[in-house]
Amino acid sequence: MSILRHTLTGAIALGVVAATTPALAFPDKPIEFVIPFGAGGGADIEGRLLAKEMSKVLGVPVTPVNRTGGGGAVAYTHTKNAKPDGHTVVWNSTSVLTSTNLGNTDFLYDALDHVGRVEFQPQPFAVRADAPWKDFGEFVTACKAAPGTLKVANAGTGSSTHTAAVMLMNAVGCKVIHLPKGIKGRNKSVLNGEANAMIAPLTGAVNLTKAGKLRLLVMPTDTRSSIFPDVPTAKELGYNVSLDLFRGLSVPPNTPNEIKKILADAMAKAANSEAFLDLAKKKGFTVAPLGHEAFSKLLAEENVKVRAIFASAGLLPTK
């Protein structure tokens, strides 16, 4: 039995909820859980586990479907055009800001309705473990001594990792070559020496760092990571920059508020499940659910930040 139907059964018997009848059956069929990126990556692993835990809460299958392309644009467009009945949700991330501001869609982030945030994580600046730079200051010195020669890999032009790299390099006054290598290629390019450094979500760097293959020099975030407490934040080093990767849920525009509330409740319960919290501890992301209002405020603030970074790099589309 769906959550909303169960909650309102008594009221229906009293005949006092006729105005909300269209939503009574929610959810009355499987929910498509759209993942914007491919199988096996951090977004996919987290999303599939969250969907599994949400299924337990909602009592219907929450089915992960990978819809890749355009840095998230394919998934967001699919969701925007879906029926606003709560049975299509998209596992958003900072890509909902980057892909839309790049012009990969004909709409901006606020064309979707946003259910809430699930987690956030820093995006560390990493080099190969045997690189000559033992700390971020040494990398900056080398960069300034040979501007335009050091290469910093990212997941793709305009991706959250590219955005963070541009922001960080702007702050320190370093001119580097930004290499868009894809998620798997980003890590590989640092390990094989093609790139000198990279920025990655913490979940994309944690295993290689623990294995002694990468060294994390700095994190452009507000507080140190509990997984790598010895790595300083950029702010500690005197650079006032911070751009975390977030993940959460969005739905088609005009989805009824009562349905969004049910999804938000299921999202928060799933995020705080033992299985999801265990994954967070292992991978280093912070489970911190936000509801619609708080998440919408955060999105607006981060969107201003992303647009400013894109403008500095000439990435905003011309009208």
Image: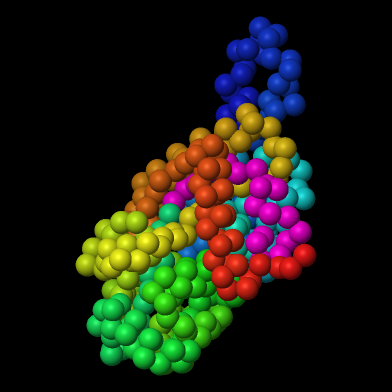
Nearer to me, 225 or 39 = 225
Query: Does residue 125 appear anywhere in the picture?
Result: yes
Which residue is pictured at 60% across the width and 67% down the height? 311
Based on the picture, tell me whether residue 82 belongs to the magenta stretch: no
In the displayed orientation, state which residue is furthest to the left: 230
The answer to which quarter of the image holds residue 130 is bottom left
Decide if residue 66 is in sight here. no
Over which residues does the magenta segment extend?
Answer: 100-119
Q: Nearer the viewer, residue 130 or 311?
A: 311
The vertical placement of 15 against 308, above or below, is: above
Q: Position of residue 135 (x, y in %)?
A: 26, 79
Q: Against 139, is 7 above or below? A: above
Residue 157 percent location from the top left of the image: 59, 75
Residue 196 image offset from top left, x and y in percent: 41, 87
Q: Is residue 8 above or below residue 112?
A: above
Tell me how many marks there are.
0
Q: Position of residue 195 (x, y in %)?
A: 45, 88
Q: Nearer the viewer, residue 300 or 86?
A: 300
Q: Is residue 22 left or right of residue 227?
A: right
Q: Quadrant of the N terminus?
A: top right
Residue at figure coordinates x 77%, y 65% from the top left: 319
In the image, what residue occupies the spot 40% across and 92% down?
146
Residue at 62% x, 17% y: name it.
9
**29 vs 128: above or below:** above
Nearest the viewer among 76 and 33 is 76
